[in-house]
Amino acid sequence: MSVLLEFSITPLDKGESVGKYVARSIDLVDKSGIDYQLGPMGTSIEGEWDDVMAVVKKCFDEMKRDCRRISVAMKADYREGASNRIRGKVESVEKRLGHPVKK
């Protein structure tokens, strides 16, 4: 079952700048080997349901090590038989536009 999942995980008790905590999560995502794309407000990951959920759990567990309040937002899209949607969905829009979107 291939799932495209976008999530953001943010400590709420560390002030305005939380980049170092986000970077720790992205390091875990990167090391997981799962396909991902970092965005300015969240990270998209694609893979089997159990694999993507395991990555989110690792990120949460790492953050709760030294954060007492954490916000997690997720949205998931399952489509049977589909793959490479992390790039394919953007490419589909670009095709309809007739040009690439800003990156």
Image: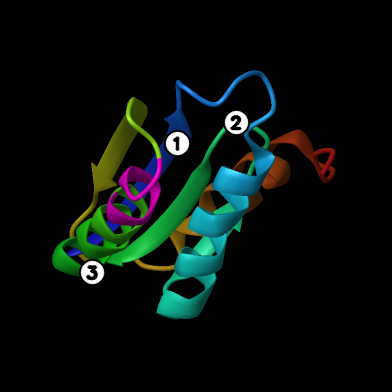
Look at mark 3 in the image and give the residue it sits on: 51
Left or right, 69 with respect to 78, comes to right
Which amino acid lies under the numbered mark 3 shown in the image of this protein? Asp
At 67% from the left and 40% from the top, the residue drawn is 19
**Above or below 32: residue 93:** above
Q: Secondary structure at mark 3?
A: helix
Quadrant of the snapshot with the C terminus: top right
* Residue 67: image location, x then y, percent: 39, 36
Mark 2 or mark 3, earlier in chain: 2
**Image: 4 above or below 39:** below
Among numbered discs 3 and 1, the one appearing first in the sequence? 1
Residue corresponding to mark 2: 41
| 97 and 69: which is toward the camera | 69
Residue located at (49% from left, 55% from top): 25
Q: Which residue is mark 1?
A: 8
Residue 38 placement (x, y as % from top left): 62, 51
Q: CA distance from mark 3 to mark 1?
A: 17 Å
